[in-house]
Amino acid sequence: MNPYALIVHWGFFGLLFLLSVCLTWLMWRYVNVMDIPSARSAHHKPIPRSGGVAIASTFGVGALIIYFFADVVRIDIGHMLAIVTCSLLVSGVSYWDDFTQRSFLAKFVAQLVCASAILSLGLVVKSIYLPFVGEVLMGWWAYLFTALWIVGLTNTVNFVDGLDGLVGGVALVAIGFLGYIAFSTDSRMVYALCYALGAGVAGFLVFNWSPARIFMGDVGSAFLGFVFACLAILGASLDHGHLSFYVVPLLLLHLIFDVFVTFVRRVISRESIIEPHRGHLYQLLHRMGWSHSAVASLYIMMTIAQGMAALLLVKLPAEDRVFVLLPFIAVYGIYAFVVLRMAQRRGLLPILA
């Protein structure tokens, strides 16, 4: 990238960052959608929870400007508009839920509809690479796999949004690594969308780091999960550089692992999996005395480690890339075991037979 292009890119990022800061400030001061503390809350006073509007709006503005004016390899206008429109629809329905406190059903239906729209336009992970096998074509299973990926990651990010700065900090670091990797592999559209998304998250994070003045709410967390899922599919299927699909799962592996372990633990202990709770690994750390910033910093450091591994992953043969995830899964297994045992000893979780 030549110096002029670098100045233009950082200048545009700066403008989007300022837009996000202004929108977050407006949502903090003037939009009265409050998160009222409850038994499962990690805060003790009402705090606005509409900051995700700034993230989604900044991304929408940035993405459209990039598509129509930036000199990047373009994807089909239908694909581009589908990603932007569907992500904003997921965000909008989630905002309505934040405002009305309706059931999870409306959000879930919106996610299914938007995932179906993405699939209908051919944004599908049609194959994956496995060790000792090589490329595996999934056929019609590709549509089920891709739908589960989109809906699953959308809700994963939503579920772990429970402490000041955690999701915002993790997302910003993950976006930085994803953008760099996309640029270095010539996946230009993913790169361009990453710095639009990163600017939105960075502006919001100014107000969200502990002690948070505003939360992103479902309007932000569900939106981020949906966009991350779409960027992984876009990079693997349509973008110029054909970015490895494994990059995004690796960058967000600690969040996925936290939700998976929590789900399995609740099934084994016969807890309702649809009832609100405080049993995620990050929540247990906080309940055991870790501060918001300490837990958020731990998960951000995990993201940095995963990002460094992702830099290695893209240089490996396609069929060997999944091996990069295995050491992290092993370490996180130990992490989960230690946290759960400590929580049981302190009476925060039932001791399983």
Image (cartoon, grey):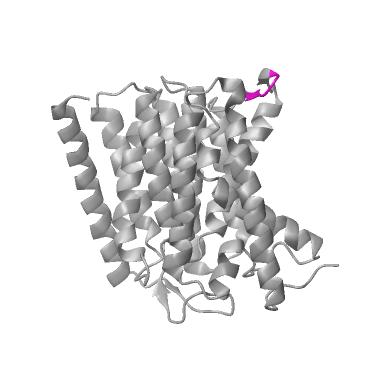
Taking the magenta stretch, the answer to whether it contains residue 130 is yes
Please state, as top left, top right, bottom left or bottom right, where the C terminus lies in the image: bottom right
Q: From this viewpoint, is residue 134 visible?
A: yes
Q: Nearer the viewer, residue 210 or 303?
A: 303
Question: Residue 161, relative to residue 124: is it above or below?
Answer: below
Left or right of 320 on screen, residue 314:
left
The residue range painted magenta reads 128-133
Taking the magenta stretch, the answer to whether it contains residue 9 is no
Question: Residue 349, relative to residue 105: is it above or below?
Answer: below
Residue 8 place in picture, x, y as percent: 17, 34
Q: Quadrant of residue 4?
A: top left
Left or right of 264 on screen, residue 170:
left
Q: From this viewpoint, is residue 110 visible?
A: no
Residue 140 place in picture, x, y as percent: 70, 24
Q: Residue furthest left?
A: 4
Residue 91 place in picture, x, y as percent: 46, 52
Question: Residue 65, relative to residue 226: is it above or below?
Answer: above
